[in-house]
Image (spheres, rainbow, N blue to C red):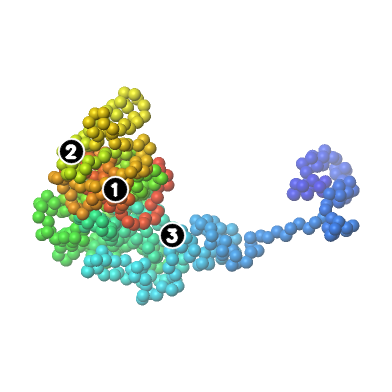
Amino acid sequence: MAVCARLCGVGPARGCRRRQQRRGPAETAAADSEPDTDPEEERIEAGSAPPSGTGGGPCAGPSPSPPRCSLLELPPELLVEIFASLPGTDLPSLAQVCTKFRRILHTDTIWRRRCREEYGVCENLRKLEITGVSCRDVYAKRINPRVKSGRFMRILPDYEHMGYRDVYTCLLHRYRHILGLWQPDIGPYGGLLNVVVDGLFIIGWMYLPPHDPHVDDPMRFKPLFRVHLMERKSATVECMYGHKGPHNGHIQIVKKDEFSTKCNQTDHHRMSGGRQEEFRTWLREEWGRTLEDIFHEHMQELILMKFIYTSHNCLTYRRIYLPPSRPDDLIKPGLFKGTYGSHGLEIVMLSFHGRCARGTKITGDPNIPAGQQTVEIDLRHRIQLPDVENLRNFNELSRLVLEVREQVRQEQQQQQQDGEGPAPPQEPLSARGPPGAPAEEGGDPRGGAAAAEQPAQSGQPFVLPVGVSSRNEDYPRTCRMCFYGTGLIAGHGFTSPERTPGVFVLFDEDRFGFVWLELKSFSLYSRVQATFRNADAPSPQAFEEMLKNIQSLTS
């Protein structure tokens, strides 16, 4: 009976209990008065136990069980190291285990490590001085650093009575859902907002393209709002828009991947000179020029319309992701700055989708709003440009492109008749000689990487045809390769949109161009050289869904 009890760990075996139930009261009392073990069981136990003495001597007995070590018996400094390696979201549950764990979790070292590893906070609260806080991390400039009228705004949070646990729970964890890249809903204009942990702040930086037409210049940025702890357990949201310093604001997380901001003190957005002074100040900051410098009447109307649209006190933001990268991509996908005529520079996201590439507008204009696919490149149909002298002739380039467009149309018709997948690419019609002559090597069914392996990667001369206008004449004079593509054009208000043929020109890893045949215009694009955190798509499907969502908002 004792063996059964030891095997079960809690008492006699089920069979033993059943035998006890079948006994009468007298038999049960007699059995209880007997020893709990019988000699045969003890003999078997003793024979199976290993000897306790060395060398298997006559002194043998059961070996002592290894000592158990409970987590509660570990020294506090070791528990601090263990707890600091756990995700911060698990620590509140751990504090409910016992009083000792709850007391240890008040150690600031644990929360400081979580702030650093999960959100990149490297500041030491105990070393920050109230009167001399780091200018980069605790000050935020009102406007672009190059503007002479900019001045620092100083805040004096109560760091002396604040701990990293407060920073983690009341600031970082509470507002973690707004970190990353976002597109504001500003009519057709869109935008690019990057919400980051900057020092002991969460700051929303609006990224702006450089002034037209300097496409290779770095991006400009200005703060729209910030969140920080002014006192323990109380996060403060401040609006940074305007010219009178930070003021009271509000952030509301509407739903997943969407939030809104609101300014509660709109008088801080006003200037003493009225709307005219506000417009002139905005024009200098946004366009780097004055109204007198802009002689074209249509361009003046476009600029005034954008000023009216962007003067909002309440904005809604929707999350955007950076495009995923694959080994067979033609170049690394990402964000680019591009020239768009009188609309100035705009931000475009280049992404690859098998045998085609797409340029989606992150910022837009009244003709083609943000979210629309401004260009689409067919990587199956490569265009071999003629020599420089013939390339200067616009009619020659137009002939090559229109021949490829006819080939694409025939392939699409064949695909519809067959009811099958995409037709295999044929040899390109561009730059071919007379019938019977050997054709140039053309598109590869494997996509961009296969095309990049061809000899043209060493570079071929490139020059714009006569009559094609470009906002930036400082474009590269050599290119790697060219592909057939289509560009989206429309009237004011996105009326009568249509896709027209064009040429995608790849210059290098960070620059490409697009020749719009119908507009006789050339757009130059340069990569945005910035690192964005919390901007990767969780899956390729999530990225595709994001593209559909931002396009449907402006369709």
- Element type at marker 2? helix
Instruction: Judge by depth and name the residue closer to the eye, 447 or 40.
Output: 447
State how far apart marks 2 and 3 are (Cα): 56 Å
Residue under circle 3? Answer: 119
The residue under label 3 is which amino acid type?
Tyr
Q: Amino acid at mark 1?
A: Gly
Most foreground residue, 280 or 527 = 527
Which residue appears at 53% of the width and 62% of the height? 84
Labels 2 & 3 near each other (Cβ < 8 A): no
Residue named by callout 2: 396
The residue to which callout 1 is attached is 459
Mark 2 or 3, nearer chain start: 3
Q: Nearer the viewer, mark 2 or mark 3?
A: 2
Q: Amino acid at mark 2?
A: Glu
User: Which numbered disc flags the more N-terminal residue, 3 or 1?
Assistant: 3
Q: Residue at x 18, y 59 (%)?
A: 283
Task: Measuring from the top left, give residue 267's x and y in whole percent.
Answer: 22, 62
